[in-house]
Image: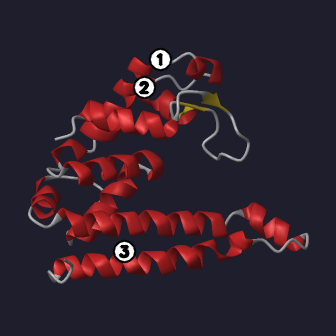
Amino acid sequence: MKSADDIISGVLEREGSKFTDDPADRGGPTKFGITLKSWREHIGNPFATADDLKVINEHQARSFYRTRYIIRPNFDRIENEHLQELVVDAGVHHGTRRAAKWLQRVAGVRQDGIIGDITLGAVNAVDPRSLYLRIVAYRIRLFGRLVSRDPELAKAREAGFNLQAKFMSGWANRACDFLDAAAQRLDNRELH
């Protein structure tokens, strides 16, 4: 079973350790994938600056992720390690409430964004592979929508640029239809 530290190591590997402040990133300044807004909330200081974020170390980042993305949302209580890692990563990338609602939707329980005993009972009682596939599909569809609805894409179209990005949502949905079909076959025990 992967530990919380193993899962956090994966998050840190995907996010990187460098401080960035890319104007195209709506999250603003980040380090270890931690936005300034999230860091302010975590440390309880609404006046923390990008310079404060620049100096956080890996130990602080691990504590941040453990608290906000594993313990607080109860993602540590998901029994399947692969599903747990996916939901934690979805929480990091899309917000824990959205990740929790996706998990609840695929488990067939009320979507309130709060992972408690009812959700965990449903999640831990079914084949995690179909839940996993469906959550991956939700993530890909969201990426497609984010790209397709980017205001900068609309500006580029108005300026006469014909960009492939306008097709992203449709392409993502098309690929996800196969993930959904595979999940359905798993549910029906048709996938070998």
Question: Residue sitting at 45 percent across and 35 percent down?
Answer: 13
Cα distance in 3D space between marks 1 and 3: 38 Å
Q: Quadrant of residue 170?
A: bottom right
The amino acid pointed to by label 1 is: Asn
Question: Residue sitting at 60 percent across and 43 percent down?
Answer: 27
Q: Residue 104 in the image: x percent, y percent?
A: 25, 64
Cα distance in 3D space between marks 1 and 2: 6 Å
Q: Please tell me which of labels 3 and 2 falls first in the chain.
A: 2
Front residue (pair 135, 107): 135
Quadrant assignment for the N terminus? top left
Q: Quadrant of residue 180?
A: bottom left
The amino acid pointed to by label 3 is: Leu
Q: Residue 87 in the image: x percent, y percent?
A: 32, 52
Res. 57 mark? 1
Which SS class for mark 3?
helix
- The label nearer to you, 1 versus 3, is 3
Question: Residue sitting at 54 percent across and 26 percent down?
Answer: 46
Q: Which residue is mark 3?
A: 179
Question: Do callouts 1 and 2 mark residues in contact (Cβ within 8 Å)?
Answer: yes
| Within-10-Å neighbours for mark 2: few <14, some 14–19, many 20+ | some
